[in-house]
Amino acid sequence: MSQSLDVTFKALGHPKRLAILKRLIRRVHTCCTVNAEEECCLEEPTCDFGELKEDLGISKSSLSLHLKELRHAGLVEKIKTGRKVALQVNPDRLEELKEFFEISIDQQTRQWMVDKVT
């Protein structure tokens, strides 16, 4: 994994950061559902800073701090266009986490089966 797991899980350990990530993931899901026949473009599944701040009901400084942690963990990407800042989930990082959990679960299942047989 490109980022260490402890940094990632620390970032996900705060309820507001988890809410931010869920919000960004939901945005991607909504975009891809609406545009199912077309390829999702990068502009659509983003949230701007103000939108996130309003949706989550937190201050600008608090949101900035949480986003810094999520970016440090590689979970969120910032896209700056002029003065406007948009945010999106990093799909590559989510895929890495998904693979980590799939491998971990697969290993646990195999171990359980071995223990069950012996």
Image: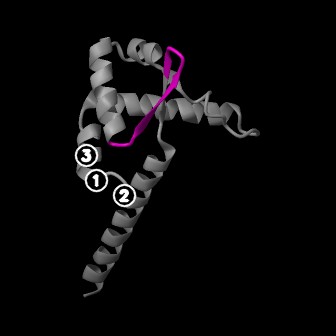
Work out whether mark 3 precedes mark 2 in sequence or the reverse, and give the earlier one: 2
Residue 36 image point, x, y percent:
71, 38
Separation (CA) of disc 2 from disc 1: 7 Å
User: Does the rendering let one see residue 58?
Assistant: no
Q: Quadrant of the N terminus?
A: bottom left
- Residue at image position (38%, 59%) is 100
Q: Is residue 114 left or right of residue 51?
A: left
Residue 16 image point, x, y percent:
29, 26
- Residue at image position (32%, 20%) is 63
| Residue holding disc 2 | 1
Q: Which mark is residue 7?
A: 3
Question: What is the residue that sits farthest to the front in this orientation?
Answer: 82
| Residue holding disc 1 | 4
- Give amino acid for label 3: Val
Q: Which residues are magenta?
A: 73-85
- Residue at image position (42%, 36%) is 76
Q: Is residue 5 left or right of residue 94?
A: left
Contact, mark 3 vs mark 1 (Cβ under 8 Å): yes
Contact, mark 3 vs mark 2 (Cβ under 8 Å): no
- Give amino acid for label 2: Met
Separation (CA) of disc 3 from disc 1: 6 Å
User: Does the rendering let one see residue 25?
Assistant: yes
Q: Quadrant of the C terminus?
A: bottom left
Residue 81 image point, x, y percent:
55, 21
- Give amino acid for label 1: Ser
Contact, mark 2 vs mark 1 (Cβ under 8 Å): yes
Residue 5 image point, x, y percent:
28, 52
Question: What is the residue that sits farthest to the right in this orientation?
Answer: 37
Magenta stretch: dominant secondary structure: strand
Q: Name the secondary structure under disc 1.
A: loop
Q: Name the secondary structure under disc 2.
A: loop
Q: Name the secondary structure under disc 3.
A: helix
